[in-house]
Image (cartoon, grey):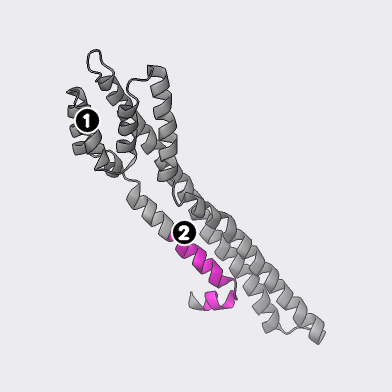
Amino acid sequence: MLEWFLRGGPVMYPLLALSLLGLAIVVERLLVLREKNFLDPAQLAVLGELLAAGEFTRAREYCAGHTGPLPVLVTTLLDNRHAPYDELKELLEDTGRHQLRFLERGLGALATVVAAAPLLGLLGTVLGMIQVFEAVSLAGTVRGEQLSAGIAQALITTAAGLIIAIPMLFLHAYLEGKAQSLVQAIEARTLEFLHLVRRPKQES
């Protein structure tokens, strides 16, 4: 593996950096985008009890002591609970879309890795071919080892770029879908809370 890396030439170093960056983003997002991090049953139970009892001030204080999309959405709900129902529901949806950007943090950089890796591989291919043609132009002929080195560099960098980009592409799609499904689940629970808050004689 080390021999292949060295034969790939200087382009292998930025490719290595891209692969490490992509791997770090994937691991971090896989750890973060877990349902229990955003829909903690204990947190849901506390908020449900407070809202059902009309303890809106205590519910807001509870949300202020916690981070994440759900406390933000519940705070938005409580701050705007006297607004018309349709307007409040639209406001919660807008807030949910804003929180989606929080959950998708780092996925833009991962998309850049997916796009850049094949391009760097192509650059390595071009540099390998240039190396072959330069040897031919200088010597008039090229020895087998020179030809082999140039072609090896071209093929190795192309393969490395694709090896990085292809799995990262699928992982990006998976993580993006995971973030969207989490936001939808959080919005669904917030709508349940909305029905608790907007029950007759429970507004305050």
Q: Is residue 137 left or right of residue 81?
A: right
Q: Position of residue 158 (x, y in %)?
A: 61, 64
Q: What range of the chain is rendered magenta?
A: 3-23
Q: Is residue 100 or residue 157 the one in the foreground? A: 100
The residue under the point 25% across, 33% down is 60
Mark 1 vs mark 2: which is more N-terminal?
2
The answer to which quarter of the image holds residue 156 is bottom right
Q: Secondary structure at mark 2?
A: helix
Three-letter amino acid code at the position of disc 1:
Thr
Q: Position of residue 4 (x, y in %)?
A: 54, 75
- Relative horizontal placement of residue 96, taking residue 154 as reference (left or right): left
Callout 1 secondary element: helix
Q: Is residue 77 above or below residue 133?
A: above
Residue 17 lies within the magenta run: yes
Which of 155 and 99 lies nearest the eye of the viewer?
Answer: 99
In the rendered view, tell whether residue 143 sits above or below residue 167.
below
| Residue type indicated by callout 2 | Gly
The secondary structure that dominates the magenta segment is: helix
**x then y, percent, for residue 177:** 44, 40
Instruction: Residue under label 2, please give it.
Output: 22
Q: Which residue is at a point 34% across and 39% down the rendered structure image?
A: 69
- Between the C-alphas of marks 1 and 2, the distance is 43 Å
Residue 126 coordinates in the image, percent (x, y) = 70, 68
* Quadrant position of the C terminus in the picture: top left
In the image, residue 185 sits, relative to residue 22, either above or below, namely: above
Q: Circle 1 is placed at which residue position?
A: 57
* Number of numbered tags placed on the structure image: 2
Question: Does the magenta portion include 179?
Answer: no
